[in-house]
Amino acid sequence: MSVTSVPGFVAAGTTCGLKPSGAPDLALVATADGAPVTAAGVFTSNKMTAAPVLACRAHLAATGGRAAAVVLNSGNANAATGVQGLADAGAMAAATAAELGCAPDEVLVCSTGWIGYPLPMDLLLAGIPEAVAALAADGGAAAAEAIMTTDTVAKTTVVSGEGFTVGGIAKGAAMLEPNMATMLAVLTTDAEVDPATATDLLRAAVGTSFNCLTVDGAESTNDTVLLLASGTAGPVDADALGTALADACASLAVQMADDAEGSTKTVFLAVTGAASDAEAAKGARDTANCQLVKCSWYGEDPYWGRIAAEMGAAGIAFDPDTITISYGGQAVYAGGEAQPVDEAALRAHMAGRTLDLDVDLGQGDGTARIVTTDLSHAYVDENMQTS
Amino acid sequence: MSVTSVPGFVAAGTTCGLKPSGAPDLALVATADGAPVTAAGVFTSNKMTAAPVLACRAHLAATGGRAAAVVLNSGNANAATGVQGLADAGAMAAATAAELGCAPDEVLVCSTGWIGYPLPMDLLLAGIPEAVAALAADGGAAAAEAIMTTDTVAKTTVVSGEGFTVGGIAKGAAMLEPNMATMLAVLTTDAEVDPATATDLLRAAVGTSFNCLTVDGAESTNDTVLLLASGTAGPVDADALGTALADACASLAVQMADDAEGSTKTVFLAVTGAASDAEAAKGARDTANCQLVKCSWYGEDPYWGRIAAEMGAAGIAFDPDTITISYGGQAVYAGGEAQPVDEAALRAHMAGRTLDLDVDLGQGDGTARIVTTDLSHAYVDENMQTS
């Protein structure tokens, strides 16, 4: 049920001592024979780019989209670490490559954890040979566990296509808008695909999954989604591969929302009837990131006033008389007025782990879907101090 | 120390029964003789505009910028109340005008409280004559108290100019980006000023005060700042009046931050060295509204990583190597690296009620200043349920 559900890939999760807790903190995903295969990546657009992201981009450019392994550490993001950080990311790749017998550029690097502290390279360099030695055909779950930070459960997925498989592991909260606990994902497949197509398909899959997930509107310095495609299953239909990648990413994204810091609700927010898809997305994102709305979800309160006000403030085509706001399929506000509802059914919906919130703006055909979470006491607890 | 510190104005705060708590909920500010004077208003840009805002705009347009009184209620925002809401706002003005002996258009109307419930007009219409009867030359403090919602203290101010005075009362959290507890302010002055100039000066004053305050990035349906200028002090220098209005608004804005829902810190955030003032403002606002940064203030943690990441994600000119982040005048991050600090002094600063956060982007001459607050358990408590 992970990256090693795909034939030809091995993985490992070990402990090198980066976390005070002593929990696993070093992960590897690699081809079983150490040979490079097609590789693609999608990265944060944050200009405060972390060293491992810069290293991944450089390595993919140097190889033309080939890689034999991904080495990942948790406990330290290697971000805002200057020139030393770049050297350290390179050294992680080189040490892994030396053990696997591939070129340093054929190893991709991910880091997640606190920003601004130099990587303890003595621990990492001692740990990498151990991780390589632990690589196993059933090592995906251990790898998923070793990249966790504030995650409480490991995130894994597997999607079966026609004649091929996509597997994945992930950690964190979101893509373009994740919380400080960077979002990382590694996907594997045995489908045959060239690097350019792989990048296009991966970007599209990220666009409909991780990029439609927001926990708190904050974008990390390290966000990375990587794909290794071995090609051993032979050529496949590109659309079918794209669908499988999107399904795998969507599964991982919902797992992230379910496990987001302090989250007690996963909210599926659909905006329809906007003047355009872009306006729908703007309204959906502003509403999903509104602290007041998030608090009302935590309180299981189907209060529509703040949702209407947020759409009214989003700078999109809007008319208070044409907006319809529904929770769990029941309209609570329509035609400019609060609506009578089945109170018991509404209360039961709001009390669930999953909320369905539909907002129809009555302006046009624009739609957007977003997955988000509530804002709880526990979120404040997790983020009020860095140590 | 309020609207009635200005000669020629009277005010009252009474109870008509809109709040279950039985606290005062009806306020009036009026000219002592009931005659109209110069009036100006600045209003929310939210398209989910509340009825009293529409009424104020219509009345100011009809009179060409003249008013004799402002009637304000708390406990109900008269927002998202459709056609009935407009009729109710008009009836509030008409009832007040009948008692004062002025025209209905010469009364401005403000409401604040929950969105989406019809105004209990029987209570309001019974209360208005009582409020008019209570109008007094020392009634400003009572008026300030009667407009409170989640406020814990009344907000008042007085600024002395050369030969004139500006007084004010306010409630709520912010202007363009207030929390659900709508921001309302009424200012009075005896300076002589025409309606067009008054509007320009008021808009400028709001721009450097309430519009530079953000609690949670949410914009209310009802936000209103009104000015009544009697002219009894005669003509004044327009710049001097503008300065006094700005000072009065700034005082009220800081009082709002100090009393914002659940706030334990008032944060003065200055962004300098941006490529433009607009880019400075974008970076400042994004950082001020970032849940993760707000939580770190609550935890008294001078963590700069998330601040740098927020600036990096703001879509503005940015270089990780040129940004300098300082708390209480001490640089904690500069030149791409964490800086050594006087730990005791830094800890003492973070433990105070007021934080000074300076971010220099090293890109140009653009600057912005914003006042904001932290995100606490109490904020979540106050907003998780509407009742």
Image (cartoon, coloured by chain):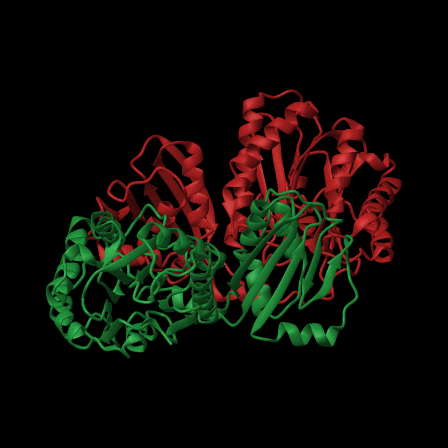
Chain colours: A red, B green
Farthest-out residue, bottom:
B138
Residue closest to the eye, A324 or A159: A324
* Residue A268 visible in this rendered orientation of the protein: yes
Q: Position of residue B299 (x, y in %)?
A: 59, 70
Left of A338 or right of it: where is B282? right
Q: Nearer the viewer, residue B286 or A274?
A: B286
- Which residue is depicted at the point 71% across and 49% down? B362
Question: Residue A171, image x and y in percent?
Answer: 62, 50
Please tell me which residue lies in front, B21 or B39.
B39
On-image quarter of the N terminus of chain A: top right
Q: Is residue A182 visible?
A: no
In the rendered image of this protein, does residue B163 appear above or below residue A360? Answer: below
Q: Position of residue A296 (x, y in %)?
A: 38, 59
Residue A58 in the image: above or below residue A110: above
Q: Is residue B141 left or right of residue A110?
A: left
In the rendered image, residue A328, in percent from the top left (x then y), is placed at 32, 48
Quarter placement of the C terminus of chain A: bottom right
Residue at x 58% of width, y 39% of height: A158
Residue A277 higher or lower than A171, as above or below: above
How many badges with numbers are in the image?
0
Image-based side of A157 in relation to A75, left or right = left
Seen at 45% across and 43% down, the residue is A370
Residue B159 position by quadrant: bottom left
